[in-house]
Image (cartoon, grey):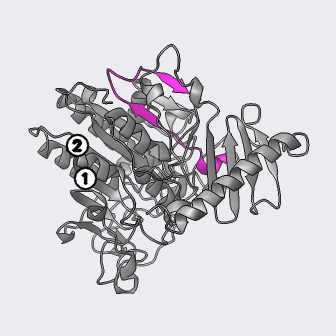
Amino acid sequence: MWVFSSAAKPPNVILLMADDLGWSDTGFNGNQVVKTPALDEMADHGLVFDHFYAAAPVCSPTRGSCLTGRHPYRYGILTANAGHLLKEEWTLAEMLKSQGYQTGHFGKWHLGTLTKTGRDSNRGGDRNQQHFAPPTDHGFDTFFSTEAKTPTWDPLWGPPKHNSKWWDPVSASKRAPYGTAYWTTKGKVQEPLDGDDSKVIMDQALKFIENNLDSDQPFFTVIWFHAPHLPVVSGKRWTTPYDTLGGYHKHYYGCISALDHQVGRLRKALKDWELSNDTMLWFCADNGPEGNSFQAPGSAWPLRGRKRSLYEGGVRVPAILEWQGTVSKGKRSNVPAVTSDFLPTIADLLGVDLPNRPYDGTSLKRLIYPDKNQGGDGLMKREIGFQSARQVAWMRGNMKYYSPDQGKTDYLFDLKEDISESVNLAEKRPDKLAQLKSALQAWRESTELSASGADY
């Protein structure tokens, strides 16, 4: 049943996602260097998830999980720049559109190519026509999106010769096309799109929201930033606070602060438009930070692992839900949650029945509307499965099974006592090890059945 009266307008929904943002790359998670005042304020006014997971340790699979409520191994996007989101998958955008929402996607798509002609980004063009899958194929009315990564400053441009990690902004007379375009329902965007890429994205998202202010329809807005994915590039305004650091580090932190500023713009606009109490605003990252922990600036401390790893640092990410007037201020939750939870949570809040197929996410409604009998206690021992390349993992409450080689080598961790995953309990707890491995195997068989097309 609806949690809103029949006369009430359903809440607007906004999904914000940073790209390759580490667990400790925000002020609200304890970083003392990077400046994220808007996200910190959002955390103070909302619910912070201390145990929130990306469904995968890389980009595309996680993004698909946000929209489908399902693990990527069910719908065939196993890694970045591979496959595409199938039309048979029922997405959050399609669900909300069926409920009368206006739907828009802004920023990084990474769930298929956006053109069938000409070379674009990693895969776009005539060589990969089978992977053409724009947002409008999946329930979005409009989009302003890229296929994959762009520089985080002057997003269409870069130096003629550059490294893959960072550079200082380049003057118009000396720059060359980077190779990734923005696309809309009308085709390729021709404007130069100079300056901060997070602002470029937010400008379009705010226009979409503003155009819906006089409508009786609620809106669903997906804003997927490129920052701080490589290459990181920031303008002087954003690098100046970090000038004592090396070039790579100051551009990395600079583009996070620039992203944060755009979150602040959005929150201010919602307040000015008197929408703060009527809007469910989510924030998370798609996976852990890029690079070697001894050289790269991103931080997942005190977690072990980084991007591409199923250790905690590769998949546990910063996350917030702000819904003023509904979600209690300044709360932190230890309930395990995952990007696959977005669809079942919002469906539950709206009273929408899901199609009859396996879902890996679960509703977090009881966290949003806690009562004396439930709260989040019933979710504390939930199970979450992971698979990426040869790595597999299975979580039940605070216990986690991990294998880097599909079960040949076993690790068992108690995350409550050992957040850094440094003590392997596999030999000491053979009973628990066997339980988790058995549950993992049953889940993997289920995902394989889904991947064969059985759900459609």
Q: Nearer the viewer, residue 422 or 71?
A: 71
Kindly tell me whether residue 287 is visible in this rendering: yes
Kindly tell me whether residue 303 is visible in this rendering: no
Disc assigned to residue 219: 2
Looking at the image, residue 116 sits to the left or right of residue 253; the answer is: left
Sequence order check, earlier mark of 2 and 1: 1
Give coordinates of residue 304: x percent, y percent: 70, 47
Residue 117 found in image quarter = bottom left
Q: Residue at position x 65%, y 66% from top?
A: 389
- Is 61 drawn above or below residue 264 in the view shown? below
Give coordinates of residue 452: x percent, y percent: 54, 69
**Amino acid type, residue under disc 2 in the picture:** Phe
**Amino acid type, residue under disc 1 in the picture:** Gly
Estimate how packed mark 2 is, as few (under 14), some (14 to 19) or many (20 or more) residues with alpha carbons within 10 Å.
many
Disc assigned to residue 104: 1
Q: Quadrant of the N terminus?
A: top left
Estimate how packed mark 1 is, as few (under 14), some (14 to 19) or many (20 or more) residues with alpha carbons within 10 Å.
many
Total label count? 2
Q: Residue at position x 78%, y 59% from top?
A: 407
Q: Nearer the viewer, residue 375 or 319?
A: 375
Local secondary structure at mark 2: strand
Looking at the image, residue 89 sits to the left or right of residue 335; the answer is: left
Task: Please provide the residue range marked out in magenta.
Answer: 309-333
- Is 453 drawn above or below residue 306 in the view shown? below
313 falls in the magenta region: yes
C-beta proximity under 8 Å, tags 2 and 1:
yes
